[in-house]
Amino acid sequence: MKILAIESSCDETAAAVVEDGRNVLSNIIASQVEEHKLYGGVVPEIASRRHAEAIVGVVNEALKTANCTVDDVDAIAVTYAPGLIGALLVGVNFAKGLSLATGKPLIPTHHLRSHIASNYISHKELKPPFLCLVVSGGHSHIVEVKDYTDMRVIGRTRDDAAGEAFDKAARAMGIPYPGGVELDKIAENGDDTAFPMPRPRVDGSPYDFSFSGLKTAVINLIHNRQQKGEDIPVADVCASYRKAVVGLLVDNFLQAADDLGYTTLVTAGGVSANSLLRRELEKRCKGKYQLFMPEKPLCGDNGAMVGAQGYYEYLAGHVAKSDLNAVATLPISEDKY
């Protein structure tokens, strides 16, 4: 089964053709990063406009690269939640129009479920059940994946997500957007023991995260040194901060795995490309857990992951009607279409 998949939840306009949920025939992405750098972050109105400008070309290129036409695909999958509402609407309305024009089934796909599904592309042997750490710019979840479309969140951030914590700290240090990616690169050359950082815990919720206090600590450190006229060893601050954020993610994730008896562990989302996070998980999982991580090009937003999850949504009978709408916020365990 060939699925044409469309993703437009944030600042990448993406389309792909995926066969049977695992075989990627094409994966085209039009990034807006260079334009949003001018503003230090994603501007929703600009993102929506750029999606509208790019989507036809991106979809055509995805079909061309896959050596097929829209008549050759069996269904159309699209990210409908969660994300920037204006950006989502571009993809959803384009997919609805294409579905109506061609008579192809329309598959509504949840963005975070799709991130998890990127692992089905990188690791064709992977099957549920497993425990997944979903970490991206706006989400930090520990998710129990019971089946391809049956998921339960057992841990989540109470404030900032890990990606937001990286981006905000980077901005305070004058590191250009996308801050989290650049902070990771700079930290590779720093001393992660130079500045002790707090490790916040959430009382009564051992799997939940809280990053706002850690973010405040690093911002106060930077401001205090600036007020005293002291140099800021950026690489050391980045390394120390990254070590604390990653430590919180890994500790809670492995604690949940032990408590729930999971030995198959998975990561997903943009922050799963973080160098230290990957190294720490590989080190601490060795010999005890079976660890799966998406290939780095599949960690960020892309159409292939939507096609992968869309296949399993279709098998579960999740097909939308022409009144499908975009939803800005939606738990991974819910469907709303």
Image: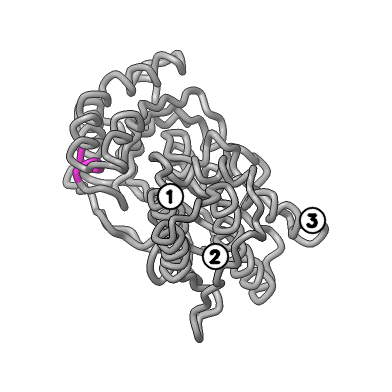
| Label 2 element class | strand
Reading the chain from its start, which is encountered first: label 3 or label 2?
Answer: 2
User: Mark 2 and 1 residues: CB-CB less than 8 Å, in contact?
Assistant: no
Nearer-the-camera pick, 179 or 60: 179
Give the label, 2 or 1, closer to the camera.
1
**Kind of residue indicated by mark 3:** Lys
Q: Position of residue 164 (x, y in %)?
A: 40, 55
- Label 3 to label 2: alpha-carbon separation: 21 Å
| Residue 279 is one of the magenta-drawn residues | no
| Label 1 element class | loop
- Label 1 environment density (alpha carbons within 10 Å; few <14, some 14–19, many ≥20): many
**Kind of residue indicated by mark 1:** Met
Give the label, 3 or 2, closer to the camera.
3
The numbered disc on residue 173 is 1
Q: Which residue is found at the position 34% from the left and 20% from the top?
A: 71
Tell me the residue that label 2 is attached to. 144
Relative side of 322 to 281, left or right: left
